[in-house]
Amino acid sequence: MLRLSRIITLVLAALTLFLSNVYPAAKIPRIGVLLLSDHGGAPIKAFRKGLNELGYVEGNNIAIEYRSAKGIPERIPHLAAELIDKKVSLILTSGTAQARAIRQANSTIPIVLAVSGDPVATGLAASLARPGGNITGLSMISPELSGKRLELLKEAAPNSSRVGVLWDGTVPENRLDFETMQFSAGIMALKLESLQIGARDDLENAFSLAARNRLNALIVIAGGVLNREKRRVLTFEMKNRLPAMHEQLDFAESAGLMAYGVSIPEMFRRSAAYVDKIIRGAKPGELPVEQPKKFELVINHKTAKEIGLTIPPHLLARADKVIK
């Protein structure tokens, strides 16, 4: 019996080896994630959740290679090359500059934008319906957003007449955003002053200009240095008791007065559907770029009290989230 048992064991081992050579284990897709800042926050958790909802389990039927440039844009091309060497099926990223750097490293690897500005205006896509090339994903752009932000800021702080716009000129889509805002301001008889920066060292000059010109409200366009220097921006707003509107919801959730825009984690969650389609064989150039369908208004009532501003009750009632 013992000898028979050993023979059976050897036969099974040989059969397993034979089958593994004839029918090798299915290769699981390997996804690259390349972001400018650290990947450990809410957006990546939301992306994983989106994958889970589609039946993917990291380490089981999908592998993910994470790379972060730690806030240093110059590192993006090197990190993109690393992921391409890893033979990833596609690269998920966020932002126009990052997508451009990846495409320069490899013009054929599929790129999914979890967050972008206007991919058509910035040359990443031929059209929203049929982007062409190797890039698709989600866009934050919506023509009415700039005017709506100004309108909401004016409702919250009706005495605002001179509005500073703080924006990072190194982010390609930000110029388009500012120009659209200028048009809206003209209709509303508001005076806009550009507080453009290009590096973190420019922030103090922008703050000094805002104070010197006695601007009485502020709009912060998301992206680049301003995302990484969020605390400094919010400290300036509080110190100068400036009513401020932000593009990104997390600014208001921290200490900014207001924010009106899309949920970044939700966009990362939805980007998982693009990853799934490309894994299954879809061509990125044939997948329409998704525009936001829902915008959220966040009002920090605690901040309003601290800067001596009374938010109209009707505006508080319209907010999706009020921080007290």
Image (cartoon, grey):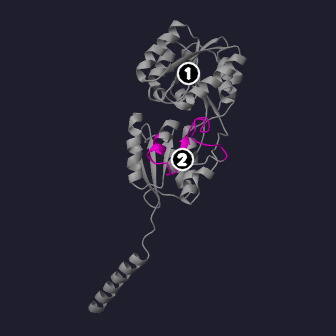
Residue 79 occupies which quadrant of the picture?
top left
Q: Would you name the residue on which mark 2 appears?
A: 112
User: In which quadrant will I find the C terminus?
Assistant: top right
Between residues 119 and 161, which one lies in front from this camera angle?
Answer: 119
Which residue is painted at 60% across and 48% down in the image? 132
Is 122 covered by the magenta stretch? yes
Picture layout, residue 323 above or below residue 194: below
Q: Position of residue 188 (x, y in %)?
A: 71, 17
State the predominant SS element of the stretch in magenta: loop
Q: Position of residue 266 (x, y in %)?
A: 57, 42
Q: Position of residue 113 (x, y in %)?
A: 54, 43
Q: Is residue 312 left or right of residue 324?
A: right
Is 141 covered by the magenta stretch? no
Residue 110 visible at all: yes
Q: Would you name the residue on which mark 1 appears?
A: 302
Q: Give me the disc on residue 122.
A: none
Q: Residue furthest left?
A: 3
Which residues are the magenta region? 101-129
